[in-house]
Amino acid sequence: MGIKEIEVEIQKLELKERATLAKWIVESLDNLSEAEVEALWAEEAERRLDELEQGIASEISDKEVLRRARAAIS
């Protein structure tokens, strides 16, 4: 299963399930070296930039991010 298929499946999860998964993923990164973490962040930044340039994703303001986050946990 590729990353795109995993992303599709993750989007099907409830918010709390996604949060639990995210926590597990973050905790699993604790065993990586600093160089590995930097490489992963660089890869993620490139993926996000590609999505913006292709019109797959769009930018939102920090205020909107906070509003959505607060709404999700309320």
Image (cartoon, rainbow, N blue to C red):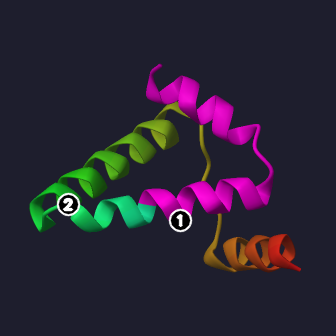
In the image, what residue type sits under mark 1? Answer: Lys
Q: Is residue 18 left or right of residue 43?
A: right
72 lies above or below 63: above
Residue 56 image-quadrant placement = top right
Check the picture and name the quadrant holding the C terminus.
bottom right
Q: At 66% from the left edge and 31% from the top edge, which residue is drawn?
A: 9
Q: Secondary structure at mark 2?
A: loop
5 lies above or below 60: above
Q: Nearer the viewer, residue 73 or 51?
A: 73
- In magenta, the rendered stretch is 1-25
Q: Nearer the viewer, residue 30 or 72?
A: 30
Distance CA(mark 1)–CA(mark 2): 15 Å
Q: Earlier in the sequence, mark 1 or mark 2?
A: 1
Residue 32 numbered tag = 2
Magenta span main SS = helix
| 10 Å crowding of disc 1: few (<14), some (14-19), many (20+) | few
The reply to whether callout 1 and callout 2 are in contact (CB within 8 Å) is no
Q: Is residue 73 left or right of residue 50?
A: right
